[in-house]
Image (cartoon, rainbow, N blue to C red):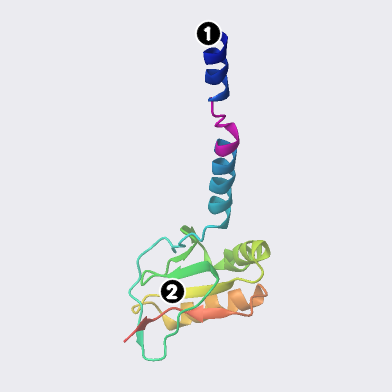
Amino acid sequence: MRDHAQNQEEEAEINMTPMLDIVFIMLIFFIVTAVFVKEAGVDVVKPNAETALAQKQVSILVAVTPNDEIHINRNEVALDSVRTTIEKLHAENPKGTVAIQADIESKAGLVMKVYDAIRDAGVEKIAIAAERQ
């Protein structure tokens, strides 16, 4: 009788290893497929526009501050290196778009130079960020 009771205890054990494997695989899947919020690295006051639309798949954010600073994905960049930086980032995600977040006090000439540099980098989809009224 003692052997029978010991035999039942061995059969009652639950192997947790396959369940933990599945949980870790699901965790990795959700981390890889998660959409991360991208920020330009500086706060800008965007102009208001009645025709503002939400953009999907914005992969590169370019911010232009009132102090003539240009920030791309949290890094300050000189105007001369905007094109090469955008080319590198756009090669990683060719389907993504570029959004320019120009402060309401920034110079229009600088924003147009940044726009031209992005266009020269081969990006066709460029959005100008605005707040909807």
Residue at the (55%, 36%) spot, across then down: 20
Mark toward the start of the polypeptide (1 vs 2): 1
**x, y percent for residue 55:** 50, 78
Q: Nearer the viewer, mark 1 or mark 2?
A: 1
Q: Is residue 115 left or right of residue 130?
A: right
Residue at x 68% of width, y 75% of height: 122
- Asked if residue 17 lies in the magenta stretch, the reply is yes
Q: Which quadrant of the view contains residue 118? A: bottom right
Q: Secondary structure at mark 2?
A: strand
Task: Please say whether residue 42 is one of the residues in the magenta stretch.
Answer: no
Residue 43, how many percent across, how many down? 35, 66
Type of amino acid at the residue the image marks with label 1: Arg
Q: Which residue is mark 1?
A: 2
Amino acid type shown at disc 2: Gln
Please say if 119 is above or below 65.
below
Name the foreground residue: 129 vs 65: 129
Q: Say which residue appears at 61% left-offset and 62% top-offset.
A: 89
Q: In this picture, which residue range is highlighted in magenta?
A: 13-19
Judge from the rendering whether residue 85 lies leftward or rightward of residue 40; answer left or right: right
Judging depth in this view, the residue of 64 and 40 nearest the camera is 40
Q: Which residue is mark 2?
A: 101
**Residue 11 image-quadrant placement:** top right
